[in-house]
Amino acid sequence: MRLVIARCSVDYAGRLTAHLPSAPRLILVKADGSVSIHADDRAYKPLNWMSPPCTLKEGDGVWTVINKAGEKLIITMEEVLHDSSHELGVDPGLIKDGVEAHLQELLADRIETLGEGYTLIRREYPTAIGPVDILCRDADGATVAVELKRRGDIDGVEQLTRYLELLNRDPHLAPVRGVFAAQEIKPQARVLATDRGIGCVVLDYDAMRGIEDDKLRLF
């Protein structure tokens, strides 16, 4: 990971245009190719970003980040205050809390919750950037990757987008479509998922637990 603190302005040119005037900011360049711009008052959310796959071209005081759709993030550097790179290695991944882990177990057990004719391939399907919660096939035999969250926000959609990018490189799985499943999906996350062709499913945890109880009842 590369961390750059610089006084810079940022322009985004794509389906929309956006401009960030000159100010000190943190620029993160990650090993997956993503570039994000951060301020000191937005918690973990970036001011602007470019998701992988994308390319970074460093010119004389200007960085240009271009994604596969031709959209550009142009960073004009006025003063670089810090520039360092760090090797973080392979991350062990997020350890899910009890409810989220149980949701995964329940949905894998009752995969038809996603639709009639769905069949499970496996839970925790491994990729180079971490395991996909559930990999399954729909009634037509097409591969479906499912990302599960208790509360679905934009970060979850971004995570699933990265998984889909990798999975679709595998000719034995492609084409792979995504389903974002959560107990609650925020409106912004739903809009982003729809824009990227990712389906959204709201899960009723209590009802799913009830289904499980019925299945295990002997009398």
Image (cartoon, rainbow, N blue to C red):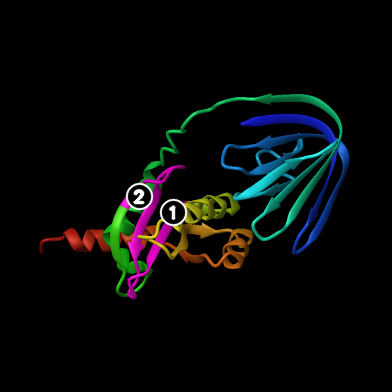
Crowding at mark 1 (Cα within 10 Å: few <14, some 14-19, many 20+): many
Residue at image coords 57%, 52%: 158
Q: Examine the rendering and report whether any part of residue 35 can be seen.
A: yes
Q: Quadrant of the N terminus?
A: top right
- Position of residue 67 measured from the top left corner of the image (x, y, whole percent): 67, 54
Above or below residue 64? Residue 140 is below
Residue at image coords 53%, 27%: 88
Above or below residue 214? Residue 122 is above
Above or below residue 75? Residue 187 is below
Crowding at mark 2 (Cα within 10 Å: few <14, some 14-19, many 20+): some
Q: Nearer the viewer, residue 95 or 88?
A: 88
Residue at image coords 73%, 30%: 4
Q: Which residues are magenta?
A: 123-149
Amino acid type assigned to the residue bearing label 1 in the image: Leu
Numbered-mark total: 2
* Quarter of the rendering containing residue 113: bottom left
- Position of residue 51 measured from the top left corner of the image (x, y, whole percent): 63, 50
- Position of residue 13 measured from the top left corner of the image (x, y, whole percent): 79, 57
Residue 125 badge: 2
- Position of residue 200 measured from the top left corner of the image (x, y, whole percent): 50, 65
Tag nearer the camera, 2 or 1 = 2
Residue at image coords 68%, 49%: 50
* Quarter of the rendering containing residue 205: bottom left
Residue corresponding to mark 1: 148
Amino acid type assigned to the residue bearing label 2 in the image: Tyr
**Residue 144 is covered by the magenta coloring:** yes
Q: Earlier in the sequence, mark 2 or mark 1?
A: 2
